[in-house]
Image: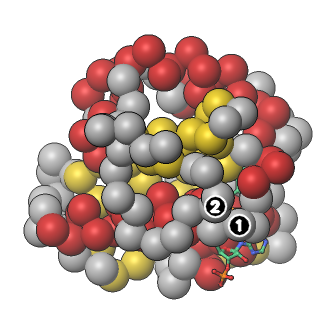
């Protein structure tokens, strides 16, 4: 049953899932699942990429998805302070048992709609070259991928986030 603060999604949510804004009290629950939900080697540092500040200062452009089993997914995003036409998705995750049911699409479509209403015309995101699931998802969502070197079989920007921290960059017009 949606609560008063439930957010209307821009596309269908899986049965029983609702969206709301995060609060800083959601931080602990989200960082406790990311390593497990990502399920990729070398990702034990992921919680450090989601400090509490995102839940304090970017809550109005982010979402928590919930169902009867608790945290179903989340999107942490924001509108660029330096490039007002750009929005950016920092993190998106969906609980493994709810994958391929349209939840991440609903999180993205809702973020797109709100970003467009706020005056943005483009949305950006990045991922690691080894995260093929993220690359397939962003391709399905209409993002173009870019990079300058082939790394692990995909085009990625070498040392994008520091030595050895290569990233595939995604962009999509709104
Ligand atoms: C990537 C992720 C968020 C996708 O969530 P999801 O709820 O399963 O995605 P959806 O069901 O909304 O899928 C939307 C589209 O992407 C496609 N897609 C999603 N994951 C895919 C995958 N692993 N392989 C191929 N296509 C995929 C779907 O088929 C669907 O395409 P369609 O709408 O054309 O039919 C989820 O797999 C996840 O949490 N992965 C771990 C965290 C992560 O890597 N996050 C992204 C980097 S920040």
Given residues 13 and 42, the one toward you in this image is 13
Mark 2 is surrounded, within 10 Å at the Cα level, by few (under 14), some (14 to 19) or many (20 or more) other residues, namely: some
Q: Position of residue 44 (x, y in %)?
A: 76, 26
| Residue 101 visible, this angle | yes
Under circle 1, the secondary element is loop
Given residues 75 and 126, the one toward you in this image is 75
Q: Is residue 28 above or below residue 82?
A: above
Q: Position of residue 10 (x, y in %)?
A: 38, 69
Does 135 sit left or right of 59 as displayed?
A: right
Q: As drawn, which residue projects farthest toward the front? A: 1
Q: Which residue is mark 1?
A: 101
**Residue shown at the point (46%, 72%) measured from the top left:** 11
Precedes in sequence: disc 2 or disc 1 = 2
| Residue 124 visible, this angle | no
- Looking at mark 1, is its residue's CB closer than 8 Å to ligand 1? yes
Instruction: Check contact, mark 2 vs mark 1: CB within 8 A.
Output: yes
Quadrant where the C terminus is found in the figure: bottom left
User: Whereabouts is ligand 1, in terms of quadrant?
Assistant: bottom right
Q: Which residue is mark 2?
A: 14
Under circle 2, the secondary element is loop
Q: Specify the quadrant of the image occupied by residue 88.
A: bottom left
Q: Is residue 162 above or below residue 88?
A: above
**Residue shown at the point (83%, 73%) measured from the top left:** 153
Q: Position of residue 40 (x, y in %)?
A: 84, 44
Given residues 157 and 170, the one toward you in this image is 170
């Amino acid at each position: 049953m949606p609560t008063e603060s439930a957010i209307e999604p821009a596309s269908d949510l899986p049965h029983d899932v609702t969206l709301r804004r995060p609060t800083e009290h959601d931080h602990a629950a989200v960082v406790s699942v990311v390593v497990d939900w990502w399920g990729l080697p070398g990702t034990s540092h992921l919680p450090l990429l989601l400090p509490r500040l995102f839940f304090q200062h970017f809550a109005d452009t982010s979402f928590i998805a919930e169902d009867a089993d608790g945290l179903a997914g989340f999107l942490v995003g924001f509108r660029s302070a330096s490039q007002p036409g750009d929005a950016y998705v920092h993190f998106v995750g969906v609980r493994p048992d709810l994958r391929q049911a349209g939840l991440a699409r609903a999180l993205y479509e809702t973020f797109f709609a709100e970003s467009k209403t706020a005056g943005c015309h483009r949305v950006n995101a990045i991922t690691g070259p080894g995260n093929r699931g993220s690359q397939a998802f962003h391709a399905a969502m209409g993002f173009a991928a870019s990079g300058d070197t082939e790394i692990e079989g995909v085009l990625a920007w070498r040392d994008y986030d520091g030595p050895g921290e290569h990233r595939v960059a995604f962009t999509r017009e709104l």
